[in-house]
Amino acid sequence: MDPDDPRRANLRPGNKRGPNKTTALLKDAILQAAGDAGGEGGLVGYLKLQAIENPGPFLSLLGKVLPMQVAGADDGPVRLTIVTGVPRADV
């Protein structure tokens, strides 16, 4: 393989064969199985079902796909308002 080939970045040291195709096949198979399990809703339907029936693992997955950087409105700072107590009707 040419030393300047961008696919070389996917190689582990000493691996001359190329990127691992089994990983891509397994990923595709998992996505297809989840889509089939979701029935008419497909993959989104399956994920909705998991959010209801298995919220712990689903929230763990959600945490991995949410953006890591948070910004406020118009890319400004994040505003945090803390309300303590219960508002009274006579005030």
Image (spheres, rainbow, N blue to C red):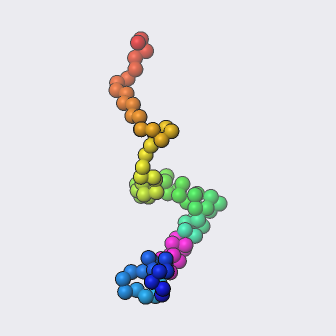
| Residue 3 lies within the magenta run | no
- How far from the left and from the top, in percent, is residue 8? 45, 80
Per the rendered image, the range of residues in magenta is 19-30
Most common SS among magenta residues: helix
Residue 59, visible in the rendered structure: no
- How far from the left and from the top, in percent, is residue 66? 46, 53
Q: Is residue 48 above or below residue 86?
A: below
Residue displayed at 49% across by 80% down: 5
Q: Is residue 9 above or below residue 74?
A: below
- How far from the left and from the top, in percent, is residue 14? 37, 86
Residue displayed at 45% across by 38% down: 76
Residue displayed at 42% across by 80% down: 11
Specify whether 65 is left or right of 40: left
**Residue lying furthest top:** 90
| Residue 25 lies within the magenta run | yes
Residue displayed at 58% across by 57% down: 45
